[in-house]
Amino acid sequence: MSDRPRSPASIPLRRCVVCRQSAPKSTLLRAVRRPDRSVSLSPSADGRGAYIHIREACLTAAATEPRQLERALRIQLPEALLADLQERTAQIANAIA
Ligand SMILES: [Zn+2]
């Protein structure tokens, strides 16, 4: 019989490509390189994925200095994706304000 509490290690962790810190998957935004070389923000799409914290500092860095994300995905990010990231950053900033 075991009364051990559920280990926190069972929570899937992913590393943010901007600040390099690991965090529970649910607190990160996933960018995915699709087979057609587009990039979308999706938690479940197939393809090479990279994670970014859903917080202002990391999203801003990803939108304005996308090199780390581009290196992780091995693709140049489309302008539309950078605009999407900036949009999400603005939403978070508004939610906090
Ligand atoms: Zn981060």
Image (cartoon, rainbow, N blue to C red):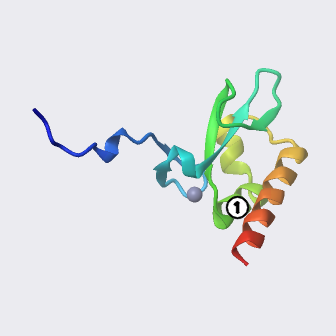
In this rendering, the answer to whether 44 lies above or below 65 is: above
Residue 88 lies in quadrant: bottom right
Which quadrant: the N terminus?
top left
Q: Position of residue 30 (x, y in %)?
A: 65, 41
Q: Position of residue 63 (x, y in %)?
A: 77, 56
Q: Position of residue 74 (x, y in %)?
A: 70, 34
Q: Amino acid at mark 1?
A: Ala
Q: Which residue is painted at 63% across and 40% down in the image?
A: 50
Q: Which residue is painted at 67% across and 25% down in the image?
A: 47
Which quadrant: the C terminus?
bottom right
38 or 23, which lies in front?
23
> Dot 1, crowdedness within 10 Å: few (<14), some or many (≥20)?
some
Q: How many numbered marks does the figure carry?
A: 1
Report which residue position mark 1 lands on. 61
**What is the residue that sits farthest to the right in this orientation?**
80
In this rendering, the answer to whether 1 lies above or below 82 is: above
**What is the residue that sits farthest to the bottom in this orientation?**
97
74 or 84, which lies in front?
84
In this rendering, the answer to whether 47 lies above or below 55 is: above
Residue 49 lies in quadrant: top right
Question: Quarter of the picture for ligand 1?
Answer: bottom right
